Image: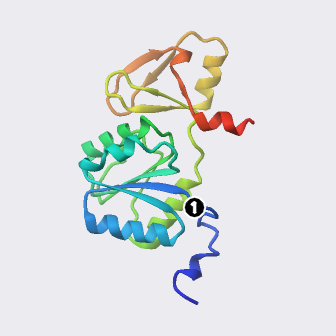
Amino acid sequence: MSAGLQHARTPNFPTEAKKVVCVSWVPELAATRELLLRAAGYAVISVLGRRDFSKLESTSNADLLILSHSVPREEKLQALIAFRRSCRAPVLSLLGHFQRPLPGVDYAVEAYNPGEFIDAVAAATSLSRVMCSVGCRKCDLILSVREDVIASAAEGQETTTLKCPYCGATCDYEPHEFLHDPDDSKKSD
């Protein structure tokens, strides 16, 4: 049995190709992650450095954004903001030693070997997409809106107060300001 086939029946791997966008600052790490992801059955778009951020804004149908531990914290935030402008897929942040999770990510993990990395991606791609989101008026971070907040807004509450986990700004939002996930309407058909 070849090395790649032994993982084909592992339940943690996707049954159909899910699209993963991977942001990295180190070309060698980006190439290695891309090989690992493709071998595990994922379709991969690599974003190498700030010069490739335009790829983030033009990707609307990704299943996961991966932010590498090598990406500086401020650039991780900028990548997250750029990605959230067009896509509400879950975000996995890979952490190095002593790195803190970035606000606005769905999943943060220290994954130092290939198995841990692929397991983290499999777990993160099994997360459901966000139903609604809203942009912070101060820093532009796209905030996920919980289902209970959406329900409160739907019950006639005039405004909902949300606090940005990144900049700490607290703002009131009207229900019409929530951005609904375009994929959510397809689920009800």
* Percent x, y of residue 133: 50, 30
At 34% from the left and 33% from the top, the residue drawn is 166
Return the residue at label 1.
17
Number of callouts in the render?
1
162 to 84, vertically: above or below: above
The colour mode here is rainbow
Residue 66 visible in rendering: yes
Q: Quadrant of residue 152?
A: top right
Image quarter where the N terminus lies is bottom right
Q: Residue 110 versus residue 74: which sits nearer the camera?
A: 74
At 49% from the left and 73% from the top, the residue drawn is 39
* Percent x, y of residue 89: 51, 44
Q: Name the residue type under label 1.
A: Ala
Image quarter where the C terminus lies is top right
Label 1 CA crowd tier, 10 Å (few <14, some 14–19, many 20+): some
* Percent x, y of residue 179: 53, 26
Q: Quadrant of residue 111?
A: bottom left
Residue 72 visible in rendering: no
* Percent x, y of residue 47: 33, 54
